[in-house]
Image (cartoon, helix red, strand yellow):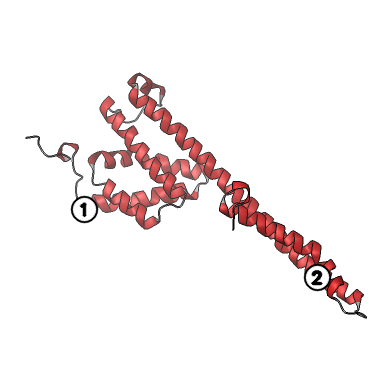
Amino acid sequence: MAQVLGLPRKTSIRITVGIAIFLLLTLTPIVLWLVAPSGVDWEKLGEISQIYGSSLSAVALLGVATSLAYQAHQTALANADARHTAYRELTILSLTDPTLMVCWPPRTPRLSMEETKQMMFVNLIINSWFTEYQLKHVTDDALLLSFRTHFRGEVARRHWQYSSSARRAWGEAMGDVYAVRFVSLGDEAFAQAAAEGPPTPSSGYFSPEA
C-alpha cells in the first residue's frame, strides 16, 4: 500500500482504514437498496442496518481514539528528544569552554576540572542509552548487558554512584516509568559489577607506549 501524501506508514494505514469505514457506512444503505429483492421488509432491514451502522461507528470511534493516543505518545517522545538534544548541546559547549562549567549547579562532593569533564561526558553516554530505551530500541536484557560492560570502568562507577539517586528522583517526580525502570536496571547491573570486584582504573585502560 502506498503511503498517503508521504506520511509515516502507520499513520497512512490509519487514515486508509478510517476512509474505508466512512465509505462503508455511507454506501451500505445504497447497496442494500440496490440488491434487496422486491417485497422486502424495509422496516426490519432498516433496524438491522442501524445496528450494523452503530457497530461500525463504535469501531470507527475506537480507531480515532487509538490514533489520537498514538499521536500523543509520539509528541511526548519528540519533546523528550528535543530536551535531550538541548542538554547535549549545552554539555558539549561546556566541555569545549571550561569557563562555562560554573554556570551549572555546584557538584557535591567537589570534583577537579578533569573529573567534572569526565562525569559530564559519561552523562552524555547514559543519556543516549536512555533515549534508545525510551524509544524501545533496546530491551531490558540488552540494556543490562551494556550497563554491566560499562561498570567495569572506574569513572563509570563513580559517575553512577554520584548520579543514580538524582536520576531516580527526577524520574519519580516526572512520573516517568521508563526513567525509573532505567535507573533500576542500572542499579542492578552496578550491584553485580561491584560484587565481581573492583573496577578497571583509568590508568589501566591502555597498554604502556613502546
SS at mark 2 in the image = helix
* Tag 2 near tag 1, CB within 8 Å: no
Indicate the position of residue 130 as horizontal and vertical percent values: 41, 45
Amino acid at circle 2: Ile
Q: Between residue 51 and residue 180, name the one nearer to us.
A: 51
Q: Between residue 71 and residue 119, name the one nearer to us.
A: 71
Image side of residue 99 versus residue 73, left or right: left
Amino acid at circle 1: Glu
At label 2, counting other C-alpha atoms closer than 10 Å, the crowd grade (few under 14, some 14-19, many 20 or more) is few
Residue at position x 31%, y 38% in the image: 159
Residue closest to the far right: 39
Residue 196 — which label?
Answer: 1
Residue at position x 84%, y 67% in the image: 30
Indicate the position of residue 160 as horizontal and vertical percent values: 32, 42
Q: Is residue 167 above or below residue 60?
A: above
At label 1, counting other C-alpha atoms closer than 10 Å, the crowd grade (few under 14, some 14-19, many 20 or more) is few
**Which comes before the other along the chain, label 2 or label 1?**
2
Q: Closer to the camera: disc 2 or disc 1?
A: 2
